[in-house]
Image: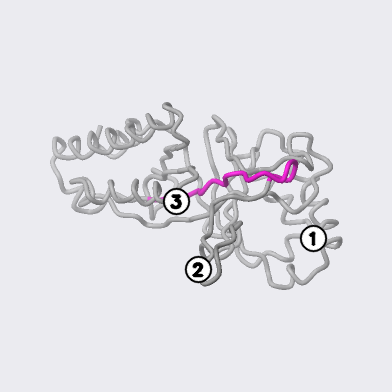
Amino acid sequence: MSTHTSPPGRPRIATNTAPSPERGTPVKRQFVTFSYFRFTESFHSLSSEQRAGVGRELIDLVRRWEQRSNDKEDVILCTYSLSGLRASTDLMFWMICEDVDLHQQFNSEIHSADLGRYITCTDRYLSQTKRSQYVVKLDPEHSEGESRFRIVPGNRKFIFVYPFVKTRDWYLLSKPVRQGIMDEHIAVGTKYRSVKLNTTYSFGLDDQDFVVAFEADDPGDFLDLVQELRETESSKYTQRDTPMYTCRRLPINQIVAQFGAG
């Protein structure tokens, strides 16, 4: 994160900008959250009519935020179901915007509404966009000059999200050595064109180094990719890459219908 110079005796104030690698001009980074929620036991004890009321409230709230994206307010909100895919959680919101306050506002609106009594957050990852330090020579879609300051979600059916932590030994390797190891890692990834990778960074912001989110239409493609990556040298330097969440992208009205709130 870049800073600007303040007069003597005054603190330097952090800004959400980073220099453009091409022109040296400030570029806004995006803050990214993956927020997981579960309907509470009290929700499941409600009558069908009451559950439908909770569902309508959640649908209205989400659609208001989706409209901000449609109005080009630089807020992107994607909704995913984990019904039948993960025991600990029911749905996930993938939110992308430049202003971290908007992430807090969205969460506050959920918990301050009546529906807040019937839904609880089970997990959340916070990260930010940043240019990769590795030169990608093999993938024309991710060239050396690409800034990667912007996350643009695709339209694939699934997203696979997990926190990622490298060992400290990894960071003690020289940059040329790390680049060589990453060349092998990247070469494997480029074989799976049907899988779209979104990497964001959490150093100092959350408990992990990165949050990685792979979009794909076929879960089998992602399974094969991960299995092959296990056999690369970079895998030796993975300290943690769990929990892994498989999320099905659906409109919010279809998600609430899965839980009897439609």
Amino acid type, mark 3: Val
For label 2, the residue is: 10
**Within the magenta stretch, is there residue 91?**
no
Q: Which image quarter is the C terminus in?
A: top left
- Please state if 243 lies on the left or on the right of 26 as rendered: left
- Residue extending furthest toward the top: 70
Amino acid type, mark 2: Arg
Q: Position of residue 165 (x, y in %)?
A: 62, 64
Closer to the observer: label 2 or label 3? 2
User: What residue do we see at 42% from left, 50% from top?
Assistant: 35
Write the start and end of the magenta stretch as one range.
20-36
Q: Which image quarter is the N terminus in?
A: bottom right
Q: Are marks 1 and 3 in contact (CB under 8 Å)?
A: no
Amino acid type, mark 1: Glu
Kindly identify which numbered label has been placed on residue 100.
3
- Please state if 234 lies on the left or on the right of 206 as rendered: right
Q: Position of residue 40 (x, y in %)?
A: 25, 53
The kind of secondary structure element at disc 3 is helix
Kindly identify which numbered label has been placed on residue 99.
none
Mark 1 or 2 closer to N-term?
2
The kind of secondary structure element at disc 1 is helix
Mark 1 or 3 closer to N-term?
3
Quote the CA–CA distance across marks 2 and 3: 24 Å
